[in-house]
Image: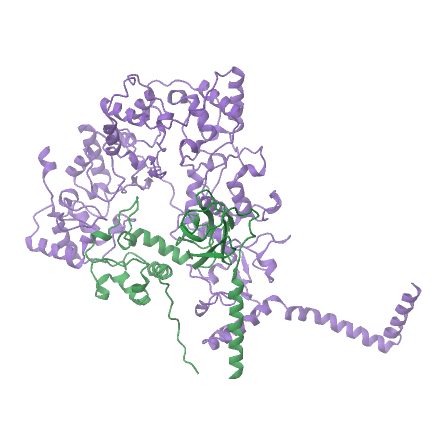
Amino acid sequence: MTMTRHWRTLFVLSLTLVCAACTHKSGPASSLKPTGFGAALVESSGGKQIGATGTVLAQPLVVQVNDEQGNAVTGAQVELSAPAGVSFEPPSGLTDSSGQFSSNVTLGSIAGRYSLAAHTFTKAQKPVDLRIEEIALGYQQMVGFQLDNKYCARCHNPESSAERVSNYDNLEVKPHSFTEGDTLNKMTDADLTAIISHGGPALNKSALMPPYGYTLSKAEIEALIAYIRLISDPPYHASGTVYAQK
Amino acid sequence: MQSSKNTFSTLWQTLFGHPVRAFGVVSLLLLISLAIAPAKNHFSEWRHYQKKYLSLVRGRGDAVSLERRFHDHDGIQQIWLPQLGVVDRCTSCHVGLKEASLADVSTQPFRKHPAIPHTLDQYGCVMCHRGQGPATTVEEAHRSTLAWEQPILPARYVQSSCGQCHRAPLTGTPQLNLGRSLLGRYGCVHCHAIKLPDGSAIKPTDDPPSLEHVADKTTREWIYAWLKDPQAYAVTATMPNFKLNDSDASDISAFLIANSTPLAGDTESGTKDLKAPDPTAGASLYGESFCSSCHAVQNAAGNVVGGDIGPELTRVGNKVKPEWLRAWLRNPRAYDAGTAMPHYRFTDPQLSLLTAFLESKTDSDLLANVHLNAATPEQIAHGKRLVAEYGCASCHEINGIKKPDNFAPELTRIGSKPLTQILFLPGMTHALPDYIAAKIRQPRSFGAALKMPQFSLAPAQVDALTTALLALTDRAHDLPMALTVPSKPPSNYQPAGKAGKLMDDMACFTCHAINGRGGDLAPDLTWEGSSVQRQWLLAFLKNPGTLRPALIRRMPRFNLSDSDAAELTDYIMTVYQTPEFDRDSMPASGYPAAQVEQGRQLFYSKYACQSCHIVDTKVDKGYIGPSLTQVGSRLNAAWIYHWLKDPQAMRPDTIEPNRNMNDEDARALTAFLMMQKGSQRQEAKK
């Protein structure tokens, strides 16, 4: 009994060590001397992007350094850091004339959410941090993402793009966006499979949601669910197998 | 010296002085040497990882079953697939690859493999990840050594491995699909030949213009500015930058203009009074003709809006001469017989309007600083030498210059290029993917004298191209055909007769596919004759209406004559019929009221079709599928019935879900839809 506890402590300890080793600052500090100092870091664009594991995100990550008055600061030092596997090009540098620093992000090779951080410091050398999240899709989630684009997004994504007008506003019963974790996280995989395969009425919901069980294969529906689970906000945590405790 | 000799002889005496003692020492040495191999085995890396794995699983709830499965297969593991040439021992250390319950473990080598459509036992590991399968140490398996130079493929390019067997686009490999299309779109294969394992070759899809009559079309000043920086003229231009100096660009432009021959009918006079017409009328004609379905324009915010089939038109007024543009708009096929641009049959006033509108799209800065002196014969001759040297004729047709063969290295097996044949730059990682990516990103960084030009590619496009090239391995070429998933063979379908000529003239295949040939911007027309009614098709060809309100890319009006429209309609109705059913097997009207009413119920309640379609514009709002207000005068009843039963059987790519509808429901819905005749305005007008 004590033996088991001993091992468990050791295991937890080693896991903590591994986790600690995972977060490291990537790249050496830029050799350029900062000429400006800001008080705040804000994200301009490039956060919450979705890409395949190990690939460069389509849009660069752009952060802006502002002073106390909210004006952009030129020449402030910005450094980016992330869990192991993620890389930046460039990892650090000075803000440009509009107070912005831009970097291309390459995602890690493991599917999941990546929490990135941007750092700058004030004139008094006080660090200022900003957290940014990006999502990496594995093969299965990537298939789901493609299927979402083809079949689901037209109704489930309320945003219209230049290429695609959203049908969301035309529907009497509003569909849930796939990022709506508060609702979707409560549904089990079996629930999601049922509503995708047999349509809204399978869960006593609107018939405006048609069945896709005769259009998509079982593997495709699994892929769609894996994708929905990964992009959900707040994040989804699988309940996992429960084993009887001795 | 003397003392060490003494020590040695004393030691010798002690060990071997007596035969019995010598026997003991020799036996001991023998025993030790015999123990080396088992000891090495005992302290090997894979044993160390297996022990670590056991201690990892011991703390878990399902330790008993995990341990039992481990002990069923401990020791060195091997996946041997003779047909694929795979001998993989990776699973000796990567022990938990198949354990579903290890989903939360993120420490390598114990992670569970993420879900993919293949199993380990079928394909092994190196098929996808590359690296050295038979190796049993971390270093030898993952990194390149002198004897084994294939390192693990970075996750960034892993989709390339799918491309070794899968020749057609896959849903899960967008990066590979993009890379393959970019090889054609950016014209890589004009210079670099790429033969595919099935014997075919990748074909360019960028259609660079012929320069045989270029002086009719544009000026030497524009050619000069374009050569210096193509993207300054159009941000979306795929033409690369050859980094020419001023005098070289000037000489090439002089040669191209001097070498150009006039072509009868590619220019028109009467363009002097162009400025007169109303610019808003020109803009609305541009809009009505759906030019933006193919051509993009950069707006004030810097966004490029529009299609990418034709060239970007943001600064087209700087480029083309009005007398050429008017002739081009009248009939593009007079200048370029194979162009993707349709022949619109504009009237003279329309031609003036559109020409004036397009000529007004200029950027005063573009040619402001271009002042070229008349060229000397020496400069023109130098320009000709440069054109040959840079291989311009690989892409463009140029009078008197032959398309060079094998202008650049063939890339058929680039994914297996031996590292010993590669000259790496200082500071570069010695790996094939890094080399390929660097070559694409900045070819001239490998030598200023290299001919390969600088392309304007986003980082994701560079990675996509690298992925597509890494798929071209020896393995991809040597796999037995039975193990590959072939792509659809290219179709050379050509419609016959007068209708065929008309379809070429209107460039139908630019947007529509028929029998496997053509674009995917508009619906596949292979079975259009079974689908639609003759009256509707005739009216639609004369004046295309709006079927899908949400689409911004639409069918333009080609101003067809009555006889041409009738010719085309008859051909489509006769030839493009499905063998699956007879289109006249169900009546166009006369359905019992009860059945129609049942169909209405089904439409609105059970199948809730109104989420995507509009039947009654007052209540329905669905914006995804085509409007059905006039579907009874547009489609055949038999088509509707069969479509409802299985939409994908009619058009494989349609997003309408298959509802597994029973015959009765399908018949009732067909009856209801056939009653939707819409307003009879079109009929009345004739």
Can residue A91 be seen? Answer: yes
Give coordinates of residue B372: x percent, y percent.
47, 19
Residue at x-position 54% and y-position 17%: B378
For this view, does B488 lie left or right of residue B503? Answer: right
Of the 4 image quadrants, the one containing the C terminus of chain B is top left
Farthest residue, direction right: B2
For the residue pair B135 and A235, the one nearer the viewer reads as A235
For this view, does B147 lie left or right of residue B77? Answer: right
Give coordinates of residue B189: x percent, y percent.
47, 37
Q: Within the image, what quadrant is residue B603 found in?
A: bottom left
Q: In the picture shown, does residue B275 fall above or below A104?
A: above
Q: Within the image, what quadrant is residue B33 found in?
A: bottom right
Q: In the picture shown, does residue A113 fall above or below B313?
A: below
Residue at x-position 51% and y-position 25%: B246
For the residue pair B363 and B59, the one nearer the viewer reads as B363
Chain B tint as drawn: purple
Specify the color scheme: by chain
Chain A tint as drawn: green
Give coordinates of residue B217: x percent, y percent.
37, 22
For this view, does B594 lie left or right of residue A52? Answer: left
Residue at x-position 15% and y-position 37%: B535
